[in-house]
Amino acid sequence: MPYSDFASMPCTLSRPAALLGERWTLLLLRQIFLGTRRFEDFQTSMEISRSVLTDRLNVLRQEDVLKRVPYQEDGRTRYEYRLTTKGKELYPVLMALRTWGEKWMAPDEEESFHLHHRDCGGGVRAKVECTECGVELTARDVQVTARS
């Protein structure tokens, strides 16, 4: 199935997969959440080609995940990329992938950085919980029903 067909499937998992499934997109979002905002800084920190970076940034802008914001440098108007509300709400998605990756794909000594709660210093992880009672859930705790 062509990659673009995922975006048109009537599924709330396939549409985000179509947007986020390209490997550079997730790494680009990681950099944005780490504070990178300028094209040159993305290119340097990620070692990504200009054409691929331009394409990924444009897709994220078209999907309203990022917006371009002008700033002045050396008397010229330049642009940096900022997360929209839609983009900021991807944070738990990236944290869920990172949490899984820390457990299953990388020993602690391979971590290039650690995330800590600003207020208490505790670690950061993603969790799935019930919207009513707040209990943490696993796949076994969730029942799937068809919409009517």
Image (spheres, helix red, strand yellow):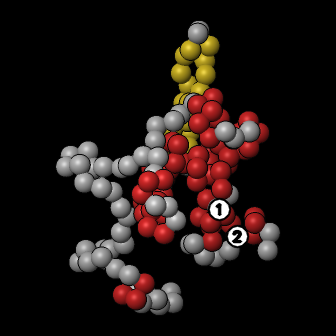
Camera-side mark, 1 or 2: 1
**Amino acid at dot 1:** Gly
Q: Going 62% across and 40% down the picture, which residue do you hit?
A: 46
Q: Secondary structure at mark 2?
A: helix
Q: Going 70% across and 70% down the picture, which residue do you hit?
A: 6
Percent across and percent down for residue 101 are: 49, 64
Badge number at residue 141: none
Q: Is residue 30 above or below residue 126?
A: above
Counting residues from the start of the chain, the first of labels 1 and 2 encountered is: 2
Q: Secondary structure at mark 1?
A: loop
Percent across and percent down for residue 140 are: 40, 89
Q: Nearer the viewer, residue 79 or 38?
A: 38
Residue at the extreme right of the image, as rendered? 2
Quadrant in which residue 138 is drawn: bottom left
Badge number at residue 6: 2
Asked whether, in this view, residue 21 is left or right of residue 92, the answer is right
Q: Is residue 3 above or below residue 25?
A: below
Q: Going 25% across and 74% down the picture, which residue do you hit?
A: 134
Q: Nearer the viewer, residue 126 or 144?
A: 126
Q: Is residue 34 above or below residue 89?
A: above
Quadrant in which residue 132 is drawn: bottom left
Asked whether, in this view, residue 27 is left or right of residue 124, the answer is right
Asked if the residues shown at circle 1 and circle 2 are in contact, with their CB atoms under 8 angstroms apart, the answer is yes
Image quarter where the N terminus lies is: bottom right
Percent across and percent down for residue 104 are: 48, 69
Q: Residues within 10 Å of mark 2 (few under 14, many from 20)?
A: some
**Amino acid at dot 2:** Phe
Task: Name the residue carrying label 1.
Answer: 21
- Let me know if residue 19 appears in the view: no
Distance from Cα at disc 1 to Cα at disc 2: 10 Å
Q: How many marks?
A: 2
Asked whether, in this view, residue 85 is left or right of residue 74, the answer is left
